[in-house]
Amino acid sequence: MSNSPALPLILAVSGASGLIYAVRALKYLLQAHYTIELVASKAAFMVWQAEQNLRLPVEPAQQEQFWRLQAGVEQAGTLICHPWGDVGATIASGSFRTLGMLVIPCSMSTVAKLATGLSSDLLERAADVQLKEGRRLVLVPRETPFSLIHLRNLTALAEAGARIVPAIPAWYHQPQTIEDLVDFVVARALDQLDIDCVPLNRWQGY
């Protein structure tokens, strides 16, 4: 298992459906003793209520407890939660060094704002910083079908250096549960950050 790295990873949760992707990513990252700077968008609070009938706390300390409970990881790793409106947070500055940023799941609204350089909240500002600093930005869009607008926005982000990892699972690893399917996507997204902490039966050839 990986040792705790010197630099933190930004984990961003937008208002797209599929919050299980964020929970599973957080679970494995904390278990591998990473330092996670987490920011959830305003819309993510509503999605939690709609999908799980759960209220995501606003206060950072309570939010940390909430995320750790959902991920099932009480003490491992370091988790720092930021309010979505705190554009003065550490992760809003390019001078704050990171391993990169993972937006999982990533809504098409977030994609559109990032593609046009808008920074109306901390999530968008932090992602914009990753692009301008030439750091790794990984987006996991969870939408279907993609409209032409979606595709053009995703293309613009890919051209700017972002890595696009759609939430599309595979079956060659013999998944038995929904978590197995989710974990495949999480592992492939973390691969883009050179992070290997998800147990996965990787393709070995025929």
Image (cartoon, grey):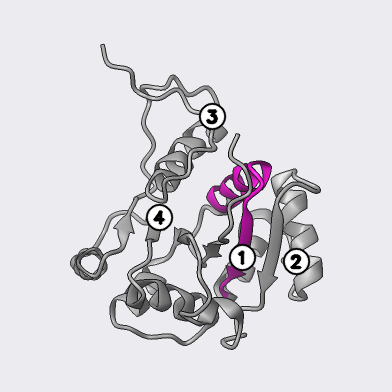
Q: Which mark is residue 199?
A: 3
Q: Quadrant of the C terminus?
A: top left
Which type of secondary structure does the marked residue at label 2 adopt? Answer: helix
Which type of secondary structure does the marked residue at label 3 adopt? Answer: loop
Residue tagged 4: 140
Q: Earlier in the sequence, mark 3 or mark 2?
A: 2
Please tell me whether residue 40 belongs to the stretch shown in magenta.
Answer: yes
Q: Amino acid at mark 1?
A: Leu
Q: Amino acid at mark 3?
A: Pro
Q: Position of residue 71 (x, y in %)?
A: 69, 47
Distance from label 4 to label 2 (Cα)? 22 Å
Residue tagged 2: 63
Distance from label 3 to label 1 (Cα)? 22 Å
Distance from label 4 to label 1 (Cα)? 16 Å
Residue tagged 1: 38
Distance from label 2 to label 1 (Cα)? 10 Å
Q: Position of residue 54 (x, y in %)?
A: 73, 60
Q: Amino acid at mark 2?
A: Gln
Which mark is in front, 4 or 3?
3
* Mark 2 vs 1: CB contact within 8 A: yes
Residue 169's place in the image compared with 155, above or below, is: above
